[in-house]
Amino acid sequence: MWLDVNKLEDAYLLLERLEPHHAQDIAEAVSNQDSQQLWFTSIPNKDKAASYVEQALSAKDQICFVVKEKSTGELLGCTRFYDIKASHRRAMIGYTWYCPKARRTSVNTRCKILLLKHLFEESQAIAVEFQTHFMNHASRAAIKRLGAKQDGILRNHQIMPDGSLRDTVCFSIIQSEWPAVRNNLNLKLSKYETE
């Protein structure tokens, strides 16, 4: 399968393929999560960690990762490639969440560098897409900070578990933009490291 990869890593983080045994670590990582306040996200709750893992592993055209701190082995969150289109050399990055400890740190920047580098440099992708709920302003801002450009909004795109209708904001980075995006992300990372 195109994009087939078992792990990605840098000096600080390890992204490894999601396995059933990660359910316990996910349950621990989300035990202090504010997922009830983030109704527009797909953060699992502690009691449903096993079903979250089962559902993620059964999904087609996805590669799911747990995000771990290398020095401690602590699980910090999850992310994935999904809607993988090998024939068009494009994929989406999403279903990303982090435990409170990892937020507002270098973790998301590091993850995105690893994922985007694999897509554009190792797999010769022509584009990557990101989608988020219209109401998820923090996610929208984070995606823009990566250097992605907003492509549009899909109105009434999905029915949420609570029955509300989701407007989905779509973003992308194309192959020719990757060098500038990479430079921007590396600059952001260097600022984290000097703080």
Image (cartoon, rainbow, N blue to C red):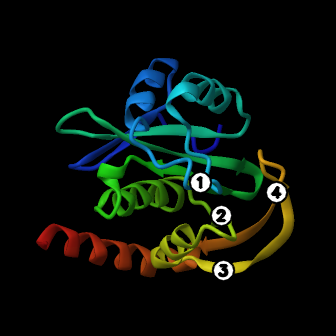
Q: CA distance from mark 3 to mark 2?
A: 11 Å
- Residue at the disc numbered 2: 132
Q: Earlier in the sequence, mark 2 or mark 1?
A: 1
Return the disc, 4 or 3, that comes first in the chain's sequence: 3
What's the CA distance linking mark 1 and mark 4?
21 Å
Q: Which residue is mark 3?
A: 150
Left or right: where does residue 146 sit relative to residue 50?
A: left
Residue in the image at 40% along x and 73% along y: 182
Whether pointer 3 and pointer 1 mark residues with C-beta atoms closer than 8 Å, the reply is: no
Nearer to me, 168 or 116? 168
- Residue type pointed to by label 4: Ser
Secondary structure beneath disc 3?
A: strand
Q: Residues within 10 Å of mark 3 (few under 14, many from 20)?
A: some
Q: Earlier in the sequence, mark 1 or mark 4?
A: 1
Residue 50: percent from left, percent from top: 56, 22
Quick one: SS at disc 1? strand
Q: Nearer the viewer, residue 110 or 137?
A: 137
Farthest-out residue, right: 156
Q: Which of the numbered marks, if any, corresponds to residue 164?
A: 4
Q: Amino acid at mark 1?
A: Gly
Where, quadrant-wise, is the C terminus in this rendering? bottom left
Label 4 secondary element:
loop
* Image mark for residue 27: none
Q: Within 10 angstroms of label 1, few (less than 14), some, or many (20 or more) residues?
A: some
